[in-house]
Image (cartoon, helix red, strand yellow):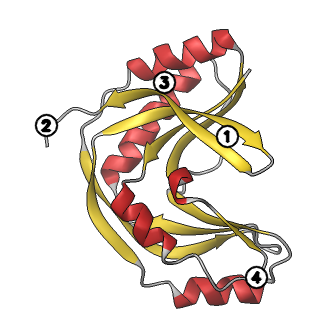
Amino acid sequence: MHRLFVALEIPEIVADALTLLQSGVDGARWVKAENFHLTLAFIGEADRHGFSAALDALEKVEAPAFDMRLSGVGVFGDRKPHALWAGVAASPELNHLQAKVETALRRAGFNLDKRKFTPHVTLAYLKNVSRDIAEKYAAQHGLFSCGPFPVEAFHLYSSELGRNGAHYAIEASYALSSSR
């Protein structure tokens, strides 16, 4: 079984900027720089047939390359905060790509999350952090901005959960068209 998701890779220079945000919250488990990504679709557990179906479905996705900029910081979890994240500046191109990926996977028979797409890069997972502390952190870093940087491909990742957190591996890459 593979635990799969589709995401954009975060360039090293952008990951370096994100790591500068990672401090000041007791109870935060900060994401390692090599694990930064922007999820387009979470597939979940898939056997080898599901893995092949995902590869085939994503092969059909066509979308143009674009530039993206990270902007702002926020919190997930209404009453009980569970994650801190860096946001993405409004990007019709990103939304278009995400919709194409989601449509291709649904047509291939995958049951995907029905929540509205909120593009973000997770900075930390929270445990026993008050809403006030999480919101204060987000407010302190609310003016964060990084980029623009080119997005020229998206990737099918596998995720292996271990004692030291998750390990992500790119299983396949899909180039975006260069008609920019």
Q: Amino acid at mark 2?
A: Ser
Q: Which residue is mark 1?
A: 113
Mark toward the viewer: 4 or 2: 4
Question: Closer to us: mark 2 or mark 1?
Answer: 2
Mark 1 belongs to which amino acid?
A: Asp
The quadrant in which residue 83 appears is bottom right
Q: Amino acid at mark 3?
A: Ala
User: Left or right: where does residue 74 sit relative to residue 65?
Assistant: right
Label pair 3/1, CB-CB below 8 angstroms: no
Marks 3 and 4, how far apart at CA: 40 Å
Labels 2 and 3: the sequence-earlier one: 3
> What's the mark number on residue 124?
none
Task: Give the CA distance from mark 2 to mark 3.
Answer: 21 Å
Tag shown at residue 104: 3
The vertical placement of 88 against 9, above or below, is below
Q: Is residue 169 above or below residue 84?
A: above
